[in-house]
Amino acid sequence: MDLRYSEEERGFRDRLRGWLQEAIPAVGPEPSPHDWDGRRAYDTGWQRKLYDAGYAGINWPSEFGGLGASPTQQLIFLEETERAGAPYVGVNFVGLLHAGPTLMAEASAEQRAAHLPPILRGDEVWCQGFSEPNAGSDLASLRTRAVLDGDHYVVSGQKIWTSHAQVADYCELLVRTDPEAPKHRGITWLILDMTTPGIEIRPLRTIAGSTEFSEVFLDEVRVPVSSRVGAENDGWRVAMVTFSFERGTAFVSEMIQSQVLLADLAALARAGLSDGPAPAWDDTGIRRDLGRLAADLDALAALTKRNISQAARTGAPGVGGSVFKLAYSEMRQRMGDVAMRILGRAALSLEDFDGLPVGAHVQGRLHAISLGIAAGTSQIQRNIVGERLLGLPKER
Amino acid sequence: MDFELTPDQAALQDAIRKQLAGRFPIEEIRGLQDRAGVDRGRWQELAQAGVFGLRLPESDGGVGLGLAEAVLVFEELGRALVPGPLLATHLAAGLIEGAADGSAVLGAVDRRIEPVLVEHLAALDALVVVDDAGLWLVEPRDVQAEAVAVPLDPLTPLHRAASLPTGAPLAGPDGAVAWARDGAVLASALQLGLAEATTDMAVAYAKERVQFDRPIGGFQAVKHILADMLVRSELARAAVYAAGVIIDVPEVGDADRAASVAKILAGEAALANAKACIQVHGGMGFTWEVDAHLYLKRAWVLDTVWGSADAHASALAAAL
């Protein structure tokens, strides 16, 4: 066990830090959360800067134009960009971290050539059409139909929780091509051009007031057979290969944001916010809860390093993913609860209020709820831990 | 950066686990209740395995390894539920004659914590007393104390000391601080071992216990308890291993902070997993015969020494 960074890793960090110092001041102000054209321009503009500097596709193999960085270098990249205040991966998320890796593993040479370079440059934005109103945790029960008609599939159905659909150029779409087959064996993975007629996008509003998710309605949308990735009815396997790209770094940026939030929260508690005459900091219970959160954050950072080290050795983060996500989402819920106690009635504003920086904490409290639901609910994660790691029998 | 065990570390962990499984089966450990928790022969065997002299230089008769390795050994001692003043004797190696080679059994007590309860007093050759001014060597027979009639952990006998002699100086304030920090990390390693043992025990039981015509581990209500146990163990393991590494190589972190983090996470894992283990065992878990309660009681003992979770949380908050 060695937590020291190698000379090569330190050099990578120093060069990146130097570049960020020059690049960040040139980034303009962040657009408003509801200005989606502005957000696309902001996020893809940053992706283009990364591309020009040779930092695009940190997790992509070099044969596809990526950096082919080690899991530890990926950790360093995410730490440094977050600490420097660089734009988040944002609208580039699905292209860089989900659709792109799937195309690398499963797509034809033509499909790769058409999509991978523009994703890397920030010219092409992707969204994900997986979940449906009746296919959430049980994703394989999805019902959006694709019927072959000549050299096209005709697709009809509804998708939900599609992030950034309103600014996406393409969608990685899972459709039902064989309704008679067992549910995992009748699914096909398609590249959907979002300008195709018959697509209607209706933004959803979350409990935090944000609008990154949409419902996508598909009415006889014609998708060329040449846009199919992998074989017909083999789409479930194609969709799952992305998980083999996971290196234990999924929450590094969030972790650093959490550390900043905790330090801010301690400062707010010391500054005198309370529901009584004394500052919240004078309350032993509040102080211990803050200390306990600091301990959890350090332990989660150590767990991240264990998962990354395991991924570097074996190519997969092992027990990491589900264990980390369960612990992280529980910790963020608790941090949010402590924030609400410290802020008292100042927490009744969703934005900064009366000169107090409360917005991030109240938004963070709401965001924490989504962590236990998105990308596999905590209940599904516990099933995965129980069945795959502990070897317990399935319930059904 | 590579936070996986080296081949040597993995071999050390494997060797001590096998030795403890062979020499400290649970029947043997339950039998130690009549001997103040310590058997001299077995104690010597632990010394020969390097448990006490692990961090002493080889030139002083030790093994010459670091806290990172000691953590792996103490994790196994916790997993096997080995009783006795293991931690005090390990920390005293190099300070007190006979500690490293197993010829002496050393205890420790913190003078600042009331009531003053000395563990394993009847088995001790010497007692180290800790306070703000440093470490003090006290003769066990000079301690005026009365046995606690029924100690909570049957394998951790206690004597209540009316007062403790001053004793002979062993180390100053800095020595006491380092002793407390390393002790917290090694105690957290014992707690980590307890947490893992109760997880394994509960998982094994849930696979074999059949109700409603199927193993209870197939029911999500039970499965999710077991999954949460693994999450607590794995998070604690990351924290405890990190603390060992950081104290050996201070440039990679803050040693005091890492020790507090480890003691909080491992303490929580040991307590919560022991309780969950009893719950998964149902009615049998509430019997003396099933071992689950021994892990819970040891976890309670360990939470009261080397800084409670609350004390460490307060220390971390002060640094925020």
Image (cartoon, rainbow, N blue to C red):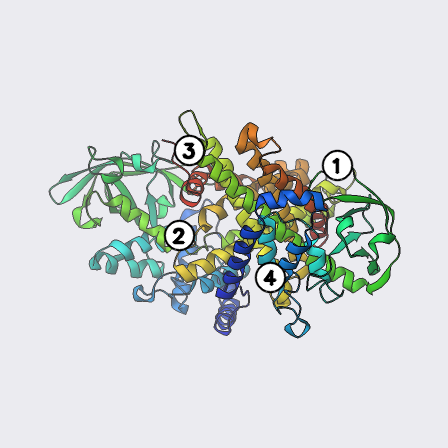
How dense is the environment of label 1, judged by Cα within 10 Å: few (below 14), some, or many (20 and up)? few
Residue A340 or residue B317, whichever sits in front: B317
Dot 1 or dot 4, earlier in sequence: 4
User: In the picture shown, does residue A16 fall above or below B46?
Assistant: below
Mark 2 belongs to which subunit?
A
- Judging by the rendered image, the residue that carries numbered circle 1 is B150
Front tag of 2 and 4: 4
Side of A396 where B3 appears, left or right: right
The amino acid type, in three-letter code, at marker 2 is Phe
Most extreme residue toward the top, as rendered? B212
The amino acid type, in three-letter code, at marker 1 is Val
Q: In x, y percent, where is residue A105?
A: 28, 56
Q: CA distance from mark 3 to mark 4?
A: 40 Å
- Judging by the rendered image, the residue that carries numbered circle 4 is B49
Q: In x, y percent, where is residue A373?
A: 46, 38
The amino acid type, in three-letter code, at marker 3 is Gly
Q: Residue B218 bears which disc, if any?
A: 3
Q: CA distance from mark 1 to mark 4?
A: 32 Å
Q: Are marks 2 and 4 on the same chain?
A: no
Tell me the element at label 3: helix
State whether residue A384 appears in this view: yes
Residue A61 or residue B274, whichever sits in front: B274
Front tag of 3 and 1: 1
On-image quarter of the C terminus of chain A: top left
Tell me the element at label 4: loop
Mark 1 belongs to which subunit?
B
The amino acid type, in three-letter code, at marker 4 is Ala
